Image (cartoon, helix red, strand yellow):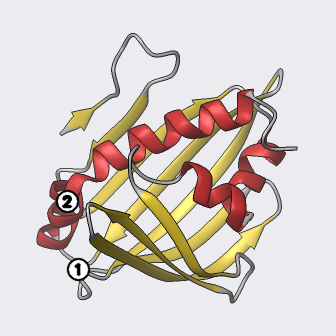
Amino acid sequence: MTSTSNPTRRHETQIVVDPDVPLVRIVREFDAPPAKVFRAHVDPELFARWTGPKGMEMRIERYDCRTGGAYRYVMSQDGEDYGFNGVFHEVRQDELIVQTFAFEGMPDDVALEKIVLEDLGGGRTRLTSTSLVDSFEGRDGFVASGMEVGVTEGYEKLDELLADGGVR
């Protein structure tokens, strides 16, 4: 399965589900240098402003984005809470984040995620996120849970945050 955001938007979010491995790959370009895209991922206040679908509230309970750090946040909508948690295994300034990711509604399906930021020059960045789950069922559960909407709308919010000077 390959999916993209609305083609009338400036940048597409490519979401590719690998048919042979329980893996999801997301590729997205941003009109900002890697340092700003990285900061938006590692600063908890910034992360809370763009992550997830529009219309959901974000509450960060713990967010220590460094090698060996951990996180837990809760997204809420219409009185329903959705918790997420994980551990940061490797964080390299402006280029790499390796972490685990667990949706607490599916606690047995933990993904290993690798986020790579590539400098495209001219103040632009390509983000490639690869998420590997230990089973096809787990991977498909993540995809079915609304991941596409959350990722696509979240990156649209990140575009706005980067454009309006919210990330320095």
Q: Residue at x 57, y 75 (%)?
A: 60
Position of residue 123 measured from the top left corner of the image (x, y, whole percent):
82, 26
Position of residue 130 measured from the top left corner of the image (x, y, whole percent):
45, 57
| Residue 22 in which image quadrant | bottom left
| SS type, badge 1 | loop
| SS type, badge 2 | helix
Screen quadrant of the N terminus = top left
Q: Examine the rendered structure and indicate whether residue 72 appears above or below residue 96.
A: below
* Left or right: 165 in relation to 152: right
Circles 2 and 1: CB distance less than 8 Å? yes
Q: Residue at x 30, y 43 (%)?
A: 149
Which residue in the rendered view is the most extreme toward the top?
8
Q: Examine the rendered structure and indicate whether residue 125 appears above or below residue 93.
A: above
Disc 2 marks which residue?
Answer: 145
Screen quadrant of the C terminus = top right
Position of residue 156 measured from the top left corner of the image (x, y, whole percent):
51, 33
How many labels, in total? Answer: 2
